[in-house]
Amino acid sequence: MPHISLTDYTKDAQFLQVEEYYVAYWSSLALESIDSGKIAKRPVVLFLHGFPSASYDWHHQWAALNATHHCVALDFLGFGLSDKPHPQRYSLQQQTDIVVAVMQHLQGYGIAQCAVVAHDYGVSVGQELLARGTELPLHIHSMTFLNGGLFAHLHRPLLTQKLLHSKLGWLVAKCMSKRTLAASFAKIFGPNTPPSAQLIDDLWQLLNTHDGRRVIPSLLRYLDERHQYAQRWRDALVMTHSQLAFINGVRDPISGQHMLDEFSRVVPHAKTFALDVGHYPQLEAPEAVTKALLECWT
């Protein structure tokens, strides 16, 4: 992942077994070398990706931070290069357990704390991590959110997501094509920062790895879980001792300006950054996102 190439992303993947599944993860430093003083002092950043993509979303930030930070990322179960079991009752609680397993893996190499950067689907996992608090293997000193459903009642899923979440979801998923994926992404990117054809090609390839389209309806259970845990996750934002920040693409119809406004109201002490882009700030305005992240951590 130090490079934008999807080939490099795939080649550099490592796999951690969590129960009976294999989860793809990336570490910018060789963990067996983590003892050296120079490496041990590097701040650790854990990236959590969104739906329906993968940790490849973070490749720009990874390349920019690689020289000064220890970057770690994973593909959630059912996403990217990780296992995609079917049938499977996917849940955000299970995904959080997987992140905890990755944290335990890092803890085994002497890492004690990290910053977390979460987008979309990963935002809910990030909120559950905050809710678990002192139970976690690593101390989260900073949690930075990008566009995502921080407050379930304000989340505005696309019609395509609603159809995939319906009883006919299996059929809609079966009929998905690269063209329909491109059309959906065009709706949520900013008008001046549309997704490139290469990006759509890469995401389509990752989506179809391990026959991934068939698990999409099951993954969309997260829309229900956001309502189920809404109060728990809102309380976590208010009660946490971690430093909070929100980098928001305000042109996003799903979780744009309206989500940023509510976040500022609920946690007025948190840092916020409004960018003139859509749902994927890390891809649409990568340099601005990296700059904001560095400000979050100072």
Image (cartoon, helix red, strand yellow):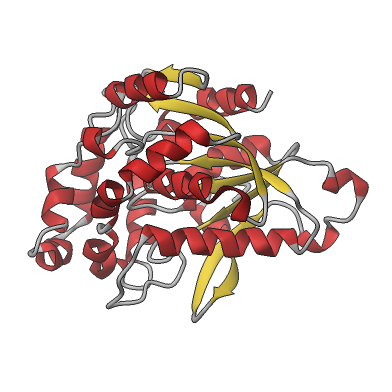
State whether residue 269 is above or below residue 44.
above
Residue sitting farthest toward the bottom? 20
Rendered image quadrant of residue 108? bottom right
Q: Position of residue 296 (x, y in %)?
A: 60, 25
Question: Is 260 left or right of 246, judged from the image as shown?
Answer: left
Along the viewing direction, whichever of 188 and 238 lies nearer the viewer: 238
Q: Position of residue 139 (x, y in %)?
A: 67, 46
Residue shown at the point (62%, 21%) measured from the top left: 295
State whether residue 43 is above or below residue 291.
below
State whether residue 86 is above or below residue 177.
below
User: The C terminus appears in which quarter of the rendering?
Assistant: top right
Q: Position of residue 4 (x, y in %)?
A: 54, 45
Image label count: 0
Residue 115 visible in the current orientation: yes
Question: Is 160 left or right of 154, judged from the image as shown?
Answer: left
Residue 10 visible in the current orientation: no
Q: Position of residue 214 (x, y in %)?
A: 24, 69
Residue sitting farthest toward the left? 168
Residue shown at the point (38%, 35%) measured from the top left: 280
Residue sitting farthest toward the right? 37
Along the viewing direction, whichever of 9 and 95 lies nearer the viewer: 95
Residue shown at the point (75%, 36%) measured from the top left: 68
State whether residue 258 is above or below residue 52.
above
